[in-house]
Image (cartoon, helix red, strand yellow):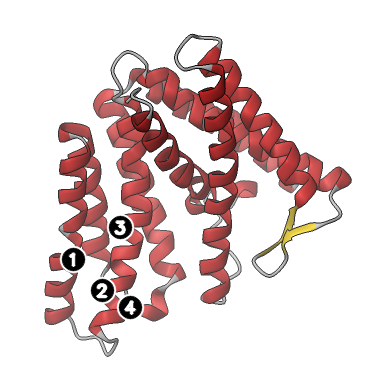
Amino acid sequence: MSNLASRVLVAAIGLPLVLGLVYVGGWWLFALAAVAAVLALHEYSLLVRSLRPLVPAAYAGAVLALLGAHLGGVDWMAAGFLATIPLAFVLHWIASTRQSATVAISSTVLGAGWIGLGLSFVLLLRAIPDHGRLATFTVLLAVFAGDIAAFFAGRLIGRHRLAPTLSPGKTWEGFVFGTAATVFVAFDALYKRHYISVGHSLLLGLLIAIAAPLGDLFESGLKRDMDVKDSGRLLGGHGGMLDRLDAPLFAATVAYFFLRAIGQA
């Protein structure tokens, strides 16, 4: 199966499933986020295995952050995540590893924070009173639209590399078309449905359009730093779970704090 056909097949199956669970929300969405977190952290642990992360502590911290976000909001999300540090310290203390405590614990906390907190902000978006479903749909669909537009524009007319040392396949042309698609989705979903003003909807679209590629480049930077080509092949042409989550993790975080800053979260 070609890479493009594989991407289309996975998106055709996965996108309705994700959007359906976002629509339902509650513990169903929590379960989806928890499964995604565990799968992504597994890939992350393989990616940085030379750093000897304390993987059980990362799993626990990420799931506790998700549980805190689901049950108690931002404060308890932070409390759940911070449990990663003492758990990692205890595990390093009793484990037989030659890696330094600083490196092992730091790599553990990075994984729990990057993945656990990022997915927690998806839950926090969904928990926004009255408009949580709309806000979450918008962020996910805006990221998806931007990714698709950037992919095809980069292939068809891409000439100037965006970040040649981190991700040679990304182009400025793809970024421009991806930004346009992302901003359009945010504007159409949020302003036309009378959630936020036209200016706020355009600005949020622009912020998502910047945050999503940065999330992608962040993962690319880790892979280059660890001298690893792929983080996984779980999702066929889309790569691993991390490859699908890297952009939404950053985008959901930015979107939540933007909506909170303008009094809409």
Q: CA distance from mark 3 to mark 4?
A: 14 Å
Q: CA distance from mark 2 to mark 1?
A: 7 Å
Query: Is residue 4 visible in this depiction of the protein?
Result: no
Query: Is residue 26 visible in this depiction of the protein?
Result: yes
Please tell me whether residue 21 is drawn above or below residue 63 in the rendered image.
above
Q: Give the image location of residue 164, x and y in percent.
A: 72, 66
- Secondary structure state at the residue bearing disc 4: loop
Name the residue rendered at 71%, 45% in the picture.
175
Residue at which label 1 appears: 85
Q: CA distance from mark 3 to mark 2?
A: 11 Å
Residue at which label 2 appears: 105
Question: Which badge, 3 or 2, comes first in the chain's sequence?
Answer: 2
Locate the C terminus by quadrant.
top left
Q: Amino acid at mark 1?
A: Ile
Please tell me whether residue 92 is drawn above or below residue 208 in the rendered image.
below
Using residue 155 as the reference point, say whether residue 176 is left or right of it: left
- Secondary structure state at the residue bearing disc 2: helix
Q: CA distance from mark 1 to mark 3?
A: 10 Å
Name the residue rendered at 31%, 41% in the picture.
120
Label placed on residue 52: 4
Residue at which label 3 appears: 112
Between 131 and 168, which is closer to the camera in this rendering?
131
Q: Say whether marks 2 and 1 touch (CB < 8 Å).
A: yes
Q: Amino acid at mark 4?
A: Arg
Q: Say whether marks 4 and 2 touch (CB < 8 Å).
A: no
Question: Which badge, 1 or 3, comes first in the chain's sequence?
Answer: 1
